[in-house]
Image (spheres, coloured by chain):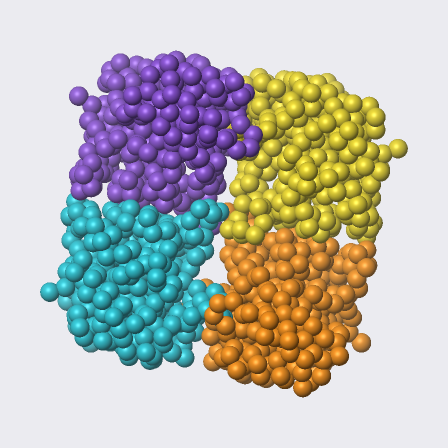
Chain colours: A cyan, B purple, C yellow, D orange
Amino acid sequence: MLIVMRPDATPQDIEQVNAEIRRRGWQPHAIPGGTRTAIGITGNRGVVEPEPFRVLPGVADAVLISQPFKLVSREVKPEDSKFQAGPLTLGGKTIHVIAGPSSVETRDQIVGTANGVKKAGATLLRGGAFKPHLSPYEFQGLKHDGLALLAEARRETGMPIVTEVKDTATLLQVAEVADVLLLGSRNMQNYALLEAVGEVRKPVILKRGISATLKEVLMAAEYIVARGNTRVILCERGIRTFETMTPNTLDLNAVPMLKSLSHLPVFVDPSHGIGMRKAVPALMRAAVAAGADGLLVQVHPDPPRAISDGHQTLDFPEFEKAMDEVRAIAGAIGRDVARLG
Amino acid sequence: MLIVMRPDATPQDIEQVNAEIRRRGWQPHAIPGGTRTAIGITGNRGVVEPEPFRVLPGVADAVLISQPFKLVSREVKPEDSKFQAGPLTLGGKTIHVIAGPSSVETRDQIVGTANGVKKAGATLLRGGAFKPHLSPYEFQGLKHDGLALLAEARRETGMPIVTEVKDTATLLQVAEVADVLLLGSRNMQNYALLEAVGEVRKPVILKRGISATLKEVLMAAEYIVARGNTRVILCERGIRTFETMTPNTLDLNAVPMLKSLSHLPVFVDPSHGIGMRKAVPALMRAAVAAGADGLLVQVHPDPPRAISDGHQTLDFPEFEKAMDEVRAIAGAIGRDVARLG
Amino acid sequence: MLIVMRPDATPQDIEQVNAEIRRRGWQPHAIPGGTRTAIGITGNRGVVEPEPFRVLPGVADAVLISQPFKLVSREVKPEDSKFQAGPLTLGGKTIHVIAGPSSVETRDQIVGTANGVKKAGATLLRGGAFKPHLSPYEFQGLKHDGLALLAEARRETGMPIVTEVKDTATLLQVAEVADVLLLGSRNMQNYALLEAVGEVRKPVILKRGISATLKEVLMAAEYIVARGNTRVILCERGIRTFETMTPNTLDLNAVPMLKSLSHLPVFVDPSHGIGMRKAVPALMRAAVAAGADGLLVQVHPDPPRAISDGHQTLDFPEFEKAMDEVRAIAGAIGRDVARLG
Amino acid sequence: MLIVMRPDATPQDIEQVNAEIRRRGWQPHAIPGGTRTAIGITGNRGVVEPEPFRVLPGVADAVLISQPFKLVSREVKPEDSKFQAGPLTLGGKTIHVIAGPSSVETRDQIVGTANGVKKAGATLLRGGAFKPHLSPYEFQGLKHDGLALLAEARRETGMPIVTEVKDTATLLQVAEVADVLLLGSRNMQNYALLEAVGEVRKPVILKRGISATLKEVLMAAEYIVARGNTRVILCERGIRTFETMTPNTLDLNAVPMLKSLSHLPVFVDPSHGIGMRKAVPALMRAAVAAGADGLLVQVHPDPPRAISDGHQTLDFPEFEKAMDEVRAIAGAIGRDVARLG
């Protein structure tokens, strides 16, 4: 159930609705819009009767939300969400490109990459400090030292930092440094982590699980938003199919589908998405043409020497050329690609 | 094995190589290129020794083909294939859009659709006369009458006709009318039909099976080309995944992958690809951005009244708008979209 | 719609119902049961009104069939189908095991295998004469000579022959020799072949496509039965999943599901099903425990030297041991495994 | 690398090997066997040279482990693992059946179910107290009260308790009550939880992720064993495929494959595996026939009234009948099904 307030509703009107919701043992969730506020209700068992709300002052309407995901659905908020991430505004017509290496390795590598991708037009820097890995014996990242190097790269370039949070134990440390948290695909249904991230006041990129349905992606986002963190970006990053020639299969159907179902920004990671370097630029272009609000791209000064993911990582010249194409595509559909000052 | 002839090789030189190949019980396949001819060898068991061929007059080199698909591979022919389809040239920088209804229904419907999609910029007309269906009790198409109506629409508009061939028994009838044959995804490994289509002198659009790997698509194309029909277009049309919100999942990874592995043109069918009308325009744009050489789009004057596939079919205004976007995207990456005179 | 006749209905009663159905432009399909006949109706558009049939003499009831598959559904015929295949009765409590090589290679090979598998307890001999293959350059089988060798093996051992039919052009030749036709997974939706097989008076094993849903399997069977050939066996033979360690994933869920939805016998092919020799015996046991009515198993005197499918083929000692286990499992669930005289 | 000690090696010999491994900055993992000890090495980068170890006293051999999973692989320990879970021994020839409801609901429900399933032959009681759910608004379990009720059911029946641990925050509470921890499929790659469970001294059932490859299952188990908890049971519980008629597809291929690759016990959960009540008994039989070492089955006194998973839950009569069949199947392949006192 969504209570839609009139444009001229007062704060007192809104508070009266909230109080009425709480009185029944439910939770109100204010969802501010361009011209008016809506209030979502969660915590109810069974159907919420609209009549008692419709008669309250300032209420324009009370509408049923048909989807199991509520706060993240377009039904609840028809216009696209936009929000701050460091100095930038994500969501909306302007496309942002996040670029950087899979793993933070050294100061030279991460600062060098930051300068390289900034020059090519990326606005945020990605780099892994805490790395989840298939094997307990693999490199797990530079951890705190990696975070410090990311912070240094930010100081040098002004680029906000995007880095993965892999568990609740390290969340606060990571959130202290990161401008945007990255929640990896293996953790998409790690509910304890979703809830913890929902309590943090940092934007989160939620990566789709490798075999998560679109509904499951939206339910995972609902976990975060229901805890109060509304700055969630949905991210398609490749699904698992029968194909063996590429590690993953990027699912660009997800872009128009998620955009139509949810008001949240939708980003695409073509690097993990196909897992094959030579095909990444074509899929960067396609993602933007499909309507993506942003891209995550793995870039490294010397991909064959990268500690991880070199096979799907672009070098600077490849990334620059791909960014030129991305800008041309964005222009062709009436959008633009952000640049740092 | 591929015998690459020198640019100045004479027809006699080529014939001598052919004779040498036949003498060993194998088959030669001449593959004409821009400046010189290459000759593929098939029918051998085990490895072909290059030395006996390298010493023949006019031979530049004899090279091993590492892939199981030979004649369709880029190794055999590095430049993109282009060929005639009616009055048009398919392949190359110019993108062609094939549009029309799932089923031919009436004279008014098909001629009206032809005029509508031509005006919006389609260059070929699609329409099903022989329709394969999941149920033996469903509508199987207007058959011969449908072909006659397609021919009439061609006379009225000058648009070449693309229509499905569903079995060997009706192949010749269909091939007599069609300018381009469409081989449906259920038939992608119907080897008798592939071989029969390989004997026909009409271009063929080979649709990927719903769970065919990229290698399997290329092996199916190899069946056709090995029989002498080199005018094959590969077509991505959606794969089967775990997602239940959409009937299919369009796999745009296939575009850069197939383009890198094969010299054949690659088309995309976003209508079947996702099976959901509202998402088709976004995927038309994405397919072109990914590098597709053409599109197949289902269009009908009144989709909700279409006999089949209405849920994934655009109406004229939707198609016109999508074509404007497709042209803008094509321009942004240095390509153009063909128009009929 | 299904017209259920009374146990005491006369042939004249049945003919009157048939005539009434035909008068409306539909087709009647008599479905003989243990104690009474039912008559399926196909060819109708829209709903069939039951009343005009309920008043005819000899009619017990007229019931709606809810599934898109009609003649093959349990709703139409609650008891298990049983039918003749050469001298044997397939379906029912007795389990039959079909064994033999992927390809017929030589007289010694096929007669030797027939003797070997008969001794171990197989009742039907399988062997491929016409072989569909991924590549146009691979061995396509001994064809007519292969059929002749199979006939010879039958003469020597009394084992009925099961062999693949790969296209309509060779169907009649194959049907002349085969006791049971095998329709391969790539042809499961080759409707021309399904219809042609529906006209032939030989039992057919219909293999599930590698990504066919259970509904699609039943619709394919419906094509055959609708043409008059009611002797259809459904066969699970492995589906395509994301797993890369085995070529296929045998889906034993299909056994209880198909048994509950259809009255047709359900066989299982664990050799193709997992595609890995060492795991075949475990899956033979599991298939029987799940309720399979028969098995197809690849057996060869010397698997590593088999022309095709050696990696998933048992030798005689492995097959004998597995058959002992299969008999024990069958006994444990109140079934038995057939033996030849 | 695996250092295999001679049967007569002394504790001092073993300690010397351990010291030598630690001296190089690696970790030794003692793997006790029937007649002799082996010592796994982890933490090395690059290849371990065997020579320096072969010359140490008590060392029989130093062998390379070819798989990325080490401590859980059959190469490291050829014989099946057996271990204690409460008063029971899991692994080996005797099959154990774990049964109970999806959610602990009330004292009567859980104690009643415990008595019911014990009578039918289950040896362990399952029941969810902390329940992960797709939606943040769904029932999340009775939590501590649920654990207390499970403990009460154990006191009443003597059945050890199996219950899910869903995150690190509640692990210790759960581990205090549970005899066996259940790690759910969504958490299969929750590395923080895997590592925490690796530190706990309770057996763990590790459920396969819905699209986890077999290699990924074994790598997840390796995380637990590498931390010192060797009592891990692998559990197949259904994968995600294209099929829409059933919620999941039980993959019984996993049983022979995992048994051949690993020494750990392999259990099967047919309830989640297919997600359809009527098909569960057939898959219980098939799992045992395929070689499963145990089963997890959802049972409830009144499945349609269960708070969760009623559609895949058996009632007592169904479970009793299925257990009779399971015992018969086990007997047929030379195994037995455990019973409590």
Which residue: 68% across, 38% down? Answer: C305
Q: Is residue D215 above or below residue D108?
A: above
Q: Would residue B187 be found to the left or right of residue C276 on screen? A: left
Q: Residue furthest front?
A: B55
**Residue C29 shows in this picture:** no
State the residue in front, D77 or A215.
Answer: D77
Instruction: Report whether C192 appears left or right of A283.
Output: right
Give percent across and percent down for residue C217.
58, 37
Residue at 50% from the left image edge and 30% from the top image edge: B48
In which quadrant is the N terminus of chain D drawn?
Answer: bottom right
Query: Looking at this rendering, what residue extends furthest in the right direction?
Result: C341
User: For the C terminus of chain D, which image quadrant?
Assistant: bottom right
Q: Is residue B285 positioned above or below D167 on the image?
A: above
| In-image side of D229 versus D319 (left or right) | left
Pick whichever, C89 or B78, lies toward us: B78
Of the pair B336 and A290, the residue shown nearer to us: B336
